[in-house]
Amino acid sequence: MENVAPPPVGDSQKIEQASSPADKLKLAVRRARLDDAERTKVVAELRGAEVARLEMLRDEILPVAAEIPKDVDLFDIGLSATERPRLFIDMIGFVEMGHDRRTYRFVQDTRLGRVVIAESERIEPMVDAVTDYIARRLIEREKALAADGTLEQAARAHIETQQKIAERHLIKTVPEAQKPPGLFSRAFSALVEILGTAALFALLALGAYSAWKYAAALWLAKHGG
């Protein structure tokens, strides 16, 4: 009768067969490492599949991105192969895979929270959604630049208006003494000056006459008596 070799014992079976109390913790740590390795392997495989699908989408989007004007720096198509792989379109828009690892989700961050723009398992609808998104962002940029130009023109016009108002106000508030006198003012000033001179001479003459008369009266009183 032939001796039949027992089947090979796996790591998990060896762990179950071990019964030494001193080795329980070591066996538990080993079992946890094995489980973690299996989960890590699965997660790595899933992440690799996500990255591959996002790379396919990126290859379809790059020809569209090549048509963006060179002076526009809003968009930066790039794949981030992190724990949660994402294909970034710009700083606020990106594509990631759904929970089923097969559905594309085009997401945008807004002031009101995160918004899903498009969602599909096929690449073509996602390429169309990204193309429309790029077009809308370009229009928003043009409007923003036009608004900046309008505001700049309005500010310049306001400054010029304020300068003109200040100049007119400065002209109105010049003191009268700094203005050249008119014809009437000059004539009146000359008349006042003449009358003042005449009055001065009249007062001097009257004073001289009074003094002479007083002196004559004293002389007559002295010699007549």
Image (cartoon, rainbow, N blue to C red):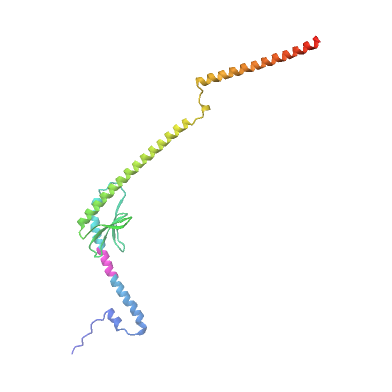
Q: Tell me where residue 61 appears, x and y as whole percent.
A: 24, 54
Q: Is residue 47 magenta?
A: yes
Residue 71 visible from this viewpoint: no
Residue at figure coordinates x 28%, y 79% from the top left: 12
Q: Which residues are magenta?
A: 40-49
Q: 205 above or below 9?
A: above
Q: 210 above or below 123?
A: above
**Quadrant where the N terminus lies?**
bottom left
Residue 18, quarter of picture: bottom left
Residue at figure coordinates x 69%, y 13% from the top left: 209
Q: Tell me where residue 50 appears, x and y as whole percent.
A: 25, 63
Q: Is residue 77 magenta?
A: no
Q: 195 above or below 78?
A: above
Q: Nearer the viewer, residue 107 or 80?
A: 107
Q: Nearer the viewer, residue 191 or 136?
A: 191
Residue at figure coordinates x 54%, y 20% from the top left: 188
Taking the image as shown, residue 119 lies to the left or right of residue 168, namely: left
**Quadrant where the C terminus lies?**
top right
Q: Tell me where residue 104 appears, x and y as whole percent.
A: 24, 60
Residue positioned most to the bottom: 1
